[in-house]
Amino acid sequence: EIVLTQSPGTLSLSPGDRATLSCRASQSLSSSSLAWYQQKPGQAPRLLIYGASSRATGIPDRFSGSGSGTDFTLTISGLEPEDYAVYYCQQYGSSPVTFGGGTKVEIK
Amino acid sequence: EVQLVESGGGLVQPGGSLRLSCAASGFTLSTYWMHWVRQAPGKGLVWVSHINRDESSATYADSVKGRFTISRDNAKNTVYLQMNSLRVEDTAVYYCTRGPGGYYYDWGQGTQVTVSS
């Protein structure tokens, strides 16, 4: 099973700041099979990024994904008030599908 | 508009059973693999099970194998998760999801399952 380690656990930033979230896999991911989700309290997760760098429909371009192999990054170029949430990475190239433990982006 | 609506959750004693349902609308269910993902209170996301388009193949997380059964009725646009021999550690919000690949494009609102004596 591929283990995904997300860092940092919590990111305290001000509106307008740039957020950089990391996701490291215990093995190289095939075909950049990594996705990112955003989850707000009491809500279901929302797909942001798939294929490591492709934005899902309707996702603002301030969200971008990059990386390959074992190291992946989600960048939010300028935090909006609605971006404060928990973010999860997920690998789907190897069975079973696994998720990282999450990074909470909170208001500084 | 794609909608996934879960139901069937509730409070059950350890060793008990529940059957979750996921009513799908806005798309042709038979063309998608379907999945269940759960989230324990204050914890992260964990994949539970998936089923292929024609119900010929289903896969389970080790933690639920032998206790949970996923099924689908494409004519009724519904996916099910039969959960037997429930344990306290199965307490979670259970989400029904779908996606074109191994990632999940659409999620239901979730249904709460609480296993407690």
Image (cartoon, grey):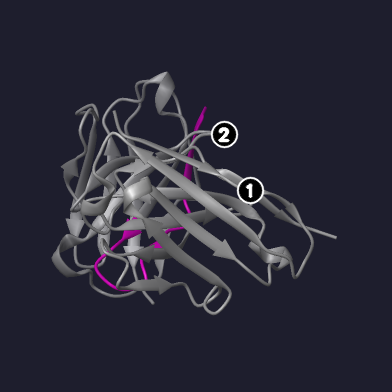
Q: What residue type is labelled 2?
A: Gly
- Residue A28 position by quadrant: bottom left
Where residue B13 sits: x, y (%)?
79, 61
Highlighted magenta segment, given as a residue range: A90-108
Q: Is residue B46 above or below residue B64?
A: above
Which residue is most to the front? B75
Where residue A7 sits: x, y (%)?
43, 54
Decide if residue B66 is in sight here.
yes
Between B99 and A66, the one lying in front of the other is: B99
Instruction: Count up the numbered dots.
Output: 2
For this view, does B113 lie left or right of residue A27?
Answer: right
Crowd around label 1: few <14 · some 14–19 · many ≥20 (10 Å): some
Where residue B41 sits: x, y (%)?
65, 49
Residue beneath label 1, please? B9
B76 falls in the magenta region: no
Q: Residue at horizontal 51%, vertical 34%?
A: A43
Same chain for the residues at labels 1 and 2, yes or no?
no
Q: Residue at horizontal 58%, vertical 44%?
A: B111
Chain containing mark 2: A
- Residue B33 position by quadrant: bottom left
Q: Residue at horizontal 42%, vertical 22%?
A: A82
Residue beneath label 2, please? A42
Q: Is mark 2 on a helix, strand or loop?
A: loop
Q: Is residue B103 above or below residue A14?
A: below
Chain containing mark 1: B
